[in-house]
Amino acid sequence: MDAFSSVHPSLWADLIAFDYWPEIGQGTLDTVVMTVVSLVLTVIVGLPLGVVLFLTGGSQRSDKPLLARAQSVIHAVLSLLVNVLRSVPFLILLILLMPATRELIGTSLGVAGSIPPLVVATSPFFARLIENLLREVEAGVFEVCRSLGATTRQTVLWALLPESVAGILGAITVTTIALIGYSAMSGVIGGGGLGDLAVRYGYQRFNTPVMVITVVILVVLVQLIQIIGDRVVTRLSHR
């Protein structure tokens, strides 16, 4: 600390006297709120969607021709919807959803206005992760449950999802990091959080320190989430 201060004697004084700490603190809080709320809604929407995509896929379809055809149609429609939403760049999706967001919650700006587009953008992504994860579960687990007379719902709730807990938490970690990046992008159109702060103060007012500090905070948030997620997944995987 002393050596660092001797090389940069005014650094700590400049940081302490920095005028934008309240705004940065509020922006960090807004980013965390956007991420947490959007993540909860994404899991609520994306997890069932991923399960439905898995159950209506080729390997899990019914032996009855009529039901199998209905499952095929459902899978094709949902798969197309997921692919379309995943193909649209997030900034474009933000703009496209502004009228719907305004109708839904009364505003398309700020933290509240960013949450619906964040959920729409990440739910298909999370659903694909869940679908692929369930495909990796041993087929024997599904067959054993069926042989014991378990229904599809019981098989999913009692066998597939518990067997995939570690993988689901890994998918949640990846989705959380994606949400942090998307929340920063929402600042381009006044979405609130650190991204909005970086655009308004860092870019438009040429305030380089604000830009650098917001980037550092975002990197720290991502690293913390990745470390915590990896440790939880590793611990569950060893059980």
Image (cartoon, rainbow, N blue to C red):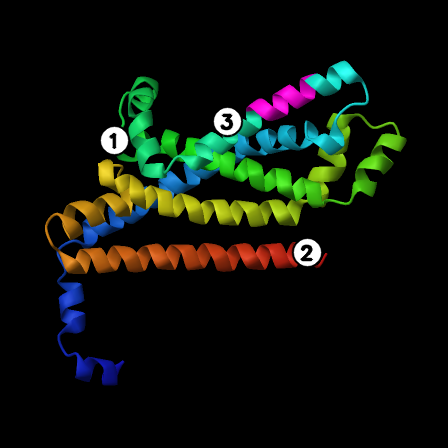
Disc 1 secondary structure class: loop
Disc 2 secondary structure class: helix
Residue, disc 2: 237
In the image, is 114 to the left or to the right of 14?
Answer: right
- Can you tell which of label 3 and label 2 is closer to the viewer? 3
The percent position of residue 104, horizontal first and vertical second, equals 35, 19
Q: Along the polypeptide, which appears first: circle 3 or circle 1?
A: 3
Q: Along the polypeptide, which appears first: circle 3 or circle 2?
A: 3
Query: Dot 3, how many residues are within 10 Å of its Cα: few (below 14), some (14-19), or many (20+)?
Result: few
The percent position of residue 73, horizontal first and vertical second, equals 63, 20
- Disc 2 + disc 1, Cβ < 8 Å: no
Residue type, mark 1 in image: Leu
The percent position of residue 69, horizontal first and vertical second, equals 71, 18
> Was residue 121 drawn as part of the magenta stretch in this picture?
no
Where's the C terminus, which quadrant? bottom right
Position of residue 78 relative to residue 170, above or below, is above
Q: Nearer the viewer, residue 196 or 77?
A: 77
Magenta residues? Answer: 70-77
Residue, disc 3: 81
Residue at mark 2 to residue at mark 1: CA–CA distance: 41 Å
- Can you tell which of label 3 and label 1 is closer to the viewer? 3
Q: Residue at x 61, y 44 (%)?
A: 168
